[in-house]
Amino acid sequence: MIRVLLVDDQTIVRAGFRVILTLADDIEVVGECGDGPTAVELAERLKPDVICMDVRMPGGDGLSATRRILADAAADAPEILIVTTFDLDEYVFGALEAGAGGFILKDTDPDDLIDAVRRLAGGYGLVDQAVTRRVMAEFARRRPAHQADSAVLGLLTTRETEIVRLLAQGMSNAEIGRELFIETSTVKSHLGRAMTKIGTRDRVQTVVWAYQNGVVRA
């Protein structure tokens, strides 16, 4: 059973998400709250697998909460799914940089919300397909100058760098395979080795790393 914590200052939003998620046989909403500090407390006490986190909340924003939760939980950290109206504010990009597993729009279809929770619980980062390129381009534009990690870049093979670059451009494993004329399983293997070398835990964080280190630019 996937344990989910809902964090949003709008009660009606939390109620809607709760109804949607409880329709899934493998998902259980174990708690909810309306501000960041309470989310930190509940994350520690309830040990959810996934937290659906709003970004702008009067009682404490989702960015600070995301950083605290991921820092405090260490190895057994929950996956953070940022749920946003997507107005391209710094909270979203900061949350991704802080370690959130992905984000989804508040007006997403119910089935997509359920799928997003399942994907994050399974260890797959997620960015809403409709806005992947736009988000990452804006993320790159808004981030301050970042010193590329030349030592880590040097560890990647030419093929691994190529695959990370195509991933950051919004391609799926299958699309990368077609682009490079290799099998999807080979793409997955190369990407896994690259993620181990650069220290990222999922596809979203790998894309963020690629933009920060100049592997791909907006």
Image: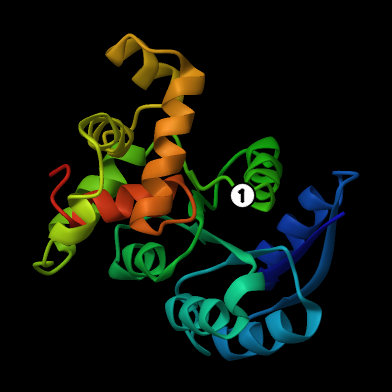
Compared to 208, does 62 lie above or below?
below
When asked about the image quadrant of residue 43, the answer is bottom right
- Disc 1 is placed on an element classified as loop
Outermost residue toward the right in this view: 25
The N terminus - image quarter: bottom right
Q: Is residue 47 visible?
A: yes
Q: Is residue 25 left or right of residue 41?
A: right
Instruction: Give the residue pinned by disc 1.
Output: 123
Label 1 amino acid?
Gly
Above or below 43: residue 127? above
Is 121 on the left or on the right of 164, as rendered? right
Which residue shows up at 46% across the image and 79% down it? Answer: 67
Q: Nearer the viewer, residue 79 or 154?
A: 154
Q: Is residue 126 above or below residue 87?
A: above
Relative to the observer, which residue lies in front, 31 or 179? 179
In the rendered structure, the answer to whether residue 152 lies left or right of residue 122 reads left
Horizontal and vertical percent position of residue 132:
36, 40
Where, quadrant-wise, is the C terminus in this rendering? top left
Name the image quarter holding residue 87: bottom left
Q: Position of residue 62 (x, y in %)?
A: 49, 76
Count of labels in the image: 1
The answer, for residue 9, to whether it is visible in the render is no
Q: How is the image coloured?
A: rainbow
* Residue drawn at (29%, 14%) of the image: 179
Q: Residue at x 44, y 45 (%)?
A: 203
Q: Position of residue 157 (x, y in %)?
A: 24, 37
Q: Along the horizontal axis of the image, is 207 left or right of 141?
A: right
Return the residue nearer the eye: 161 or 116. 161
As displayed, is residue 57 above or below residue 131?
Answer: below
Mark 1 Cα shell of 10 Å, populated few (<14), some (14-19), many (≥20): few
